[in-house]
Image: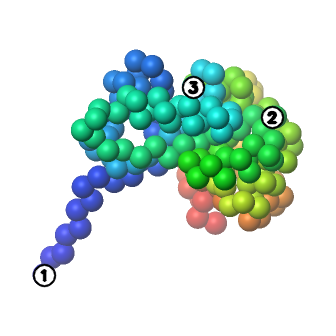
Amino acid sequence: MTKTLTITRPDDWHLHLRDGAALKAVLPDTARQFARAIVMPNLRPPVITTELAIAYRARILEALPTDMQFESLMTLYLTDNTSAEEIAKAKASGLIHGVKLYPAGATTNSDSGVTSLDKCTPALEAMEKLGMPLLVHAEVTDSDVDVFDRERVFIERNMIPLLRKFPALKIVFEHITTKDAADFVTE
């Protein structure tokens, strides 16, 4: 006997809704397909505080057609200056479900991203303690590193030391593209 499981409205664990006109264009299609989503914070300006995340969520709800349901699981954009207090505030809000690490200059709207994980120690300590996941865009931006090696070099330089320093930190290694990353995740 064949058994079938149909997921009618799954979750999207990595969604870029953007803002303004793009948000209004993308959200209805997203809400038709997905019940909820982890919303990426790389806007201009980036979503770096709990207040900004709450305001962004309000814009999402305002753009949602009245006949649709959709739950926005908000995230913060990690910077060199993100404080432990901000992480605690985000966790306490109940609306923020992760903190996104963009290396500075690595992708769209990442110019405010992290320049050194050492500068993020207070935030990462708080995240580890509170169980707040770190969502990682994993690539280095060095011009002398081949584009196809950026993920592997990020693992060597950042992920391995990060896991040693924060062994209980919940980490999501997002949109991996290499065998090196797949091997790293499975080890």
The residue under the point 28% across, 44% down is 33
Going from N to C along the chain, the mark reached first, 2 or 1, is: 1
Q: Could you tell whether 166 is left or right of 38 in the image?
A: right
Question: What secondary structure is found at the residue carrying circle 2?
Answer: loop
Q: Which residue is mark 2?
A: 80
Rendered location of residue 34, percent (x, y): 33, 47
Q: Quadrant of the C terminus?
A: bottom right
* Image quadrant where residue 62 sits: top left
Q: Which mark is residue 43?
A: 3
Going from N to C along the chain, the mark reached first, 3 or 1, is: 1
Q: At label 2, which amino acid type do we have? A: Asp
Q: Is residue 153 visible?
A: no
Q: Which of the two marks, 3 or 1, is nearer to us in this view?
A: 3
Q: At label 1, which amino acid type do we have? A: Met
**Label pair 3/2, CB-CB below 8 angstroms:** no
Rendered location of residue 14, percent (x, y): 48, 43
Q: Quadrant of the N terminus?
A: bottom left
Measure the C-alpha gap from mark 3 to mark 1: 49 Å
The residue under the point 50% across, 36% down is 57
Q: Could you tell whether 170 is left or right of 72 in the image?
A: right
Q: Residues within 10 Å of mark 2 (few under 14, many from 20)?
A: some
Q: At label 3, which amino acid type do we have? A: Leu
Q: Nearer the viewer, residue 101 or 37?
A: 37
* Image quadrant where residue 184 sits: bottom right
Measure the C-alpha gap from mark 2 to mark 1: 56 Å
Rendered location of residue 65, percent (x, y): 29, 32
The residue under the point 34% across, 49% down is 35
In the picture as drawn, the residue positioned furthest to the bottom comes out as 1
Q: Which of the two marks, 2 or 1, is nearer to us in this view?
A: 2
Q: Which residue is mark 1?
A: 1
